[in-house]
Every structure is written in C-alpha cells, then in structure tokens.
Image (cartoon, rainbow, N blue to C red):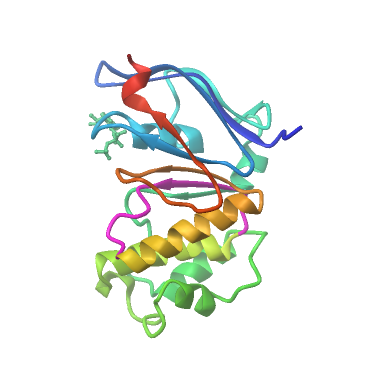
Amino acid sequence: MNKTVLAGQQLQCIRDERILFDQLSFQVHAGEILQIEGRNGSGKTSLLRILCGLALPSEGEVLWCGQSIERAANEFRSELIYVGHYPGVKADLTPLENLAFVRSLTAQSQAISDEQALAQFGLYGFEDVPTRTLSAGQQRRVALARLFVRQAQVWILDEPFTSLDKTAIKMLEQLIDNHAQSGGLVVLTSHHPVHCPKTPVLTLDLNASLG
Ligand SMILES: Nc1ncnc2c1ncn2[C@@H]1O[C@H](COP(=O)(O)OP(=O)(O)OP(=O)(O)O)[C@@H](O)[C@H]1O
C-alpha cells in the first residue's frame, strides 16, 4: 500500500469573516499531481500556505504520512519545496548566490551543479548578474531552478507557470511529470490546464467546495 501521502482533513479557511473553503478533505499520494483550481480570490494560495504550514486553518488539519505537519514538522519540511506566487529569490544576490543559499539550507542536495541547474532553465550567461536585473520570467526561472538543486519529495508550486514562455512551460511540465513518475508528489495552482504526458493531473475545484 502507498503510505506516502499529504492529506487535508476537514480544512476550513476564513479571511475577513468570509469562508473561503470549509470541510475540505483530500489526499495526494506519491506519484500524483494535484492541481488546485478556482476563480481569483477563491483561496488557492491560502490553501497552499496551509499545506506548507505557513498558515493555520481555522478548522481541520494537514497530515503528512498520517501525522499532523506540526508533529512531523522536521520530517515534512525536509521533504518540502515551496515556490510561492512571488519568485521568492533574493534580488540583490546573483542567481548562483541564490542557489548556493538554497543548497546551504539543505542536507539533501542533488548531484547537479548550480551552473547546470541554471543552464537547464535557460539561464546560461546570466549566472553572475544581480537577480533584480533579470526579467520577470528569468526571475521565475531562478526560483524554479531550486527544484533541480534540492532533493525533496513534495513540491508545492503556486502559479509556477506565470511569466514563463512556451519553452519554459513545456520544460516545467516535463520536470513535474518526471518528479511524479519517480515517486514525487506535486500540488500546484494554475489558471491553465497542465499537460503532463505520463501522469494524470488530478484537480480540486475550490469553487465547488462551497457548493
Ligand atoms: N492575510 C490575509 N488577510 C486578509 N485577507 C486575506 C489574507 N490572505 C488572503 N486574503 C484574502 O483571501 C482571499 C483569497 O486569497 P488567495 O490569495 O488565497 O486567493 P487565490 O485563489 O490564490 O487568488 P488568485 O487566483 O487571484 O491568485 C482574497 O480575497 C484575499 O484578499
């Protein structure tokens, strides 16, 4: 039986006295991709932040392999990469320095070098410039290069395709697909369909959760 699972249990989120979602339960297993859908303001980012442990639900809990993510905090965080809605890169550092920072925080690095990780995302030649001088799409690529550098089973990605061109979108879809195929687990938001040829993309519609 596949026991590696991230689960939301009876989750409720209230913002400004508005219930965004209520009694929301779902599971994501190793090898699965879950796309959270919903209109602007429906609570997708709020849900991802709750799943990462960056925000608390008003009710319910998030479980990692059967344990609450507070109780299993160390195990869960060591298996988690979160790429938020904003790239989350340090603007005054270069792309190489940003990746070195990520690597310094992790015990489980990938064998790939930082230069190779950046080159994979089309940033060859941009390794040593301040990240703030890069375009929006290039800054997003620096943030996503983390996926090559850190080894983590759980990827939580908030609108990762924003600002990316067609080539980078295809590459990221491939990367997500490969991650799932090798036993990873991905939860993401996107306003567009996500095409992963080898892995079915499951969906959870937040608009439907309130009926
Ligand atoms: N910290 C906060 N304090 C007050 N309201 C908040 C907070 N965070 C989010 N909200 C509100 O909660 C609602 C949902 O926000 P959220 O960012 O989760 O939506 P979303 O589905 O990701 O939207 P989008 O598709 O536009 O990115 C919004 O109306 C937002 O204003």
Residue at the location (64% across, 41% down)? 30
- Please determine whether, in this image, residue 72 is positioned above or below residue 97: above
Q: Is residue 207 left or right of residue 99?
A: left
Res. 14 image quadrant:
top left
Residue 188 spot, x, y in % from top left: 43, 43
Outermost residue toward the right in this view: 1
Residue 2 spot, x, y in % from top left: 72, 35
Residue 91 appears in the rendering: no
Outermost residue toward the front in this view: 197
Outermost residue toward the bottom in this view: 125
- Residue 142 among those drawn in magenta: no
Residue 99 appears in the rendering: yes
Q: Which residues are magenta?
A: 151-165
Residue at the location (59% across, 44% down)? 77
Residue 149 spot, x, y in % from top left: 56, 65
Residue at the location (55% across, 65% down)? 148
Q: Nearer the viewer, residue 168 or 83?
A: 168
- Please determine whether, in this image, residue 59 is positioned above or below residue 26: above
Main secondary structure found in the magenta portion: loop
**In the rendered picture of this protein, how many numbered marks are placed on residues?**
0
Work out which quarter of the rendered image holds the C terminus and state it. top left
The image quadrant in which ligand 1 is located: top left
Work out which quarter of the rendered image holds the N terminus and state it. top right
Residue at the location (51% across, 72% down)? 117
- Residue 161 among those drawn in magenta: yes
Q: Nearer the viewer, residue 204 or 65?
A: 204
Res. 138 image quadrant:
bottom left
Res. 189 image quadrant:
top left
Residue 3 spot, x, y in % from top left: 72, 33
